[in-house]
Image (cartoon, rainbow, N blue to C red):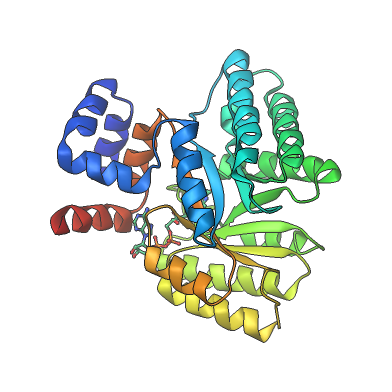
Amino acid sequence: MLRRMLLALSDSGGTKEMVQSAPLTRGLVHRFVAGETPSAALGTAGRLLTRGLAVGLDPLVEDTLSRDRAAAVRDIYVDLLRRSRALGAPEGAVDVSVKLSAVGQFLPRHGEKTALENAHAICAAAAGSGATVTLETEDHTTTESTLAIARELRADFPTVGVVLQSRLRRTEGDCRELTGAGVRVRLSKGAYAEQESVAFAHRAETDRSFVRCLRMLMAGDGHPVIATHDARLLRISAALAARYERPLGSYEYQMLYGVAPEQQTRLAAGGETVRVHVPYGAEWYGYFLRRLAEQPSNLAFFLRSAASR
Ligand code: FAD
């Protein structure tokens, strides 16, 4: 019920002002969202790079059913990537996350083709700026289409990454297909509420699936990306990297801006590649509330943060 309430609020423009202006909530938003503008995100990215962390820029843009809006979102990325050159970051230190639904995947006519064309333009801009691109995954209905688009893009841009969700029953099979040389797979638990027919119902099953998937990726020739803050899974990931004699830099950790900063610092101090995911944009409100709604543990975290301020 709480989840439904939060999702309803995420569509309500009126409450955005309220959340933004309440001092406590505003503090929480700024802890997890870098700001509303590209300049704010690039400022945060610059500070993280100085601390030896890599960055993943994430413009917060919602899905669209308009071709014009999809093109406008593409241009937001192209502009961001052009501006990111001023950071002077080493090759590959900047990645951008792309939600295909925001660049046209859900258009009723030729949605997949439009998303592919827009994502291709974003990948070309990234290549020109020494950056990489990762395709995010949304709910299970989009997985097949997202993997197909990733396959097409990799033909021209071999560093294009894709997110897989260990919560989905299909993911072990997908991992098996994605262990080739250089293939970047960002393994996460998955943020979407899914039916038991397609997803594991219990957290323990999702965690066991995460470990099975990661073992496969670590044993392969690709570039596994470990996207979790779960301390136990982080320990297991380190053990798997050692078991498969993975050199530093042949895999990486990714975490969200403002989440588990002590783990980020600890891993980076040990020479690991740690990429901090930096969300920003005027459309932060839906993202913020969906993070609360999607995972009860996230909600508990936010409430604990609020209580400790
Ligand atoms: P959990 O068991 O949920 O959390 C472990 C601990 O981490 C918690 O106890 C808590 O202390 C802390 N924690 C976790 N999340 C938060 C939070 N939001 N705020 C504060 N504390 C937190 N999901 C997708 O479905 N598609 C994607 O494309 C995608 N991309 C991602 C990219 C990155 C870089 C990361 C880190 C996650 C991504 N996710 C994505 C989200 C992911 O699937 C999980 O929903 C989220 O990361 C929480 O899961 P966890 O692995 O940290 O484990």
Q: Quadrant of residue 238?
A: bottom right
Q: Where does ligand 1 appear, by image quarter?
A: bottom left
Residue 85 visible? The answer is: yes
**Left-right relation of 232 to 226:** left
90 or 170, which is in the foreground? Answer: 90
Say which residue appears at 61% left-offset and 39% top-offset. Answer: 86
Q: Quadrant of the N terminus?
A: top left
**Left-right relation of 28 to 250:** left
123 or 217, which is in the foreground? Answer: 123
In this rendering, the answer to whether 79 lies above or below 298 is above
Count of labels in the image: 0
In this rendering, the answer to whether 195 lies above or below 83 is below
Say which residue appears at 61% left-offset and 33% top-offset. Answer: 83
Residue 79: percent from left, percent from top: 62, 28
Residue 38: percent from left, percent from top: 50, 32
297 or 141, which is in the foreground? Answer: 297
Q: Quadrant of residue 214?
A: bottom right
Say which residue appears at 54% left-offset and 43% top-offset. Answer: 57
Residue furthest out toward the right: 155
23 or 6, which is in the foreground? Answer: 23
**Left-right relation of 292 to 209:** left
Say which residue appears at 78% left-offset and 41% top-offset. Answer: 153
Residue 247: percent from left, percent from top: 71, 77
Residue 139 visible? The answer is: no
Q: Quadrant of the C terminus?
A: bottom left
Residue 80: percent from left, percent from top: 59, 32
**Left-right relation of 20 to 208:** left
